[in-house]
Structures are given as C-alpha cells and as structure tokens.
Amino acid sequence: MSELQRSLRGLHEELQRADRLEPGDRVLLETLLGDIRRLLGTPPPAPGAEQLPSVREHGDALEGAAVRLEAGHPGVAGAIRAVLDALGKAGI
C-alpha cells in the first residue's frame, strides 16, 4: 500500500472517530476524500466529459479544513496534513 493510500485510509479512520465534527466539515472532507480517490483511480476524462475538481483545488480546501480543525480536532487535522504531504511526495 502506498503512502498516499495509507494517508487517505488514516483520514477516513479519523473522520469515523470524530464524533463532534461540524456536519459541514464532515461532508466537505468526505466529499474531498471520495473525489481524490476517484481522481487517482481513473484515467483523464475525455474532452467534453464532466470534469471533477483538480487535486490542487482539493489541496487548497483540505489545507483550509486542517487550519479550521486544528484546535478542536487535532487528529483529523493531522490526517489531512498527512494526505497533503503524501500528495506532494507523489508529485500531485
């Protein structure tokens, strides 16, 4: 299993443990997690096909979420940063 896959799994596990996470933050993170998995597991879309947000756009949203959640949910914030670090190391 790659570092990125481990990081994504870790974020998913932290989200499952975070019982008092704001509903909006939970939805955002679960959506981003699913989109990143889809982006990494599928070939580039054909011209004219529906475009998913880029990994870079997700990175910006993830960093914002990590900053917001640092005080109240340090485990989730750390897991987000691990995903961002793994994406960077993978050149994504």
Image (spheres, grey):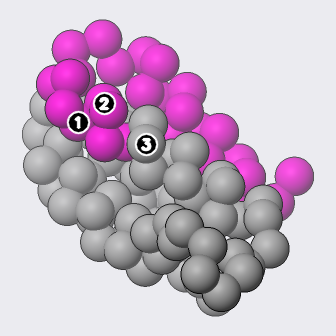
Which residue in the rendered view is the most extreme toward the top?
19
Q: Quick one: 41 or 74, which is closer to the camera?
A: 41
Q: Tag 1, which secondary structure?
A: helix
> Residue 56's spot in the image, x, y percent?
43, 79
Closer to us: 50 or 73: 50
Q: Amino acid at mark 1?
A: Asp
- Cα gap from disc 2 to disc 1, whole angstroms: 4 Å
Residue under circle 1? 25
Towards the viewer: 19 or 58? 58
Q: Residues within 10 Å of mark 1 (few under 14, many from 20)?
A: some
Q: Which residues are magenta?
A: 1-29
Measuring from the top left, give residue 24's x and y in whole percent: 19, 32
User: With respect to residue 20, does 51 lie above or below?
Assistant: below
Residue to which mark 2 is pinned? 26
Q: Which residue is mark 3?
A: 31
- First in residue order: circle 3 vs circle 2: 2
Left or right position of 13 against 91: left
Is residue 81 toward the left or the right of residue 23 in the image? right
Residue 37 badge: none
Magenta region includes residue 21: yes
From the image, state whether disc 3 or disc 2 is nearer to you.
3
* Element under disc 3: helix
Q: Residue shown at 54%/33% (left/top)?
A: 12
Figure quadrant of residue 39: bottom right
The stretch drawn in magenta includes residue 36: no
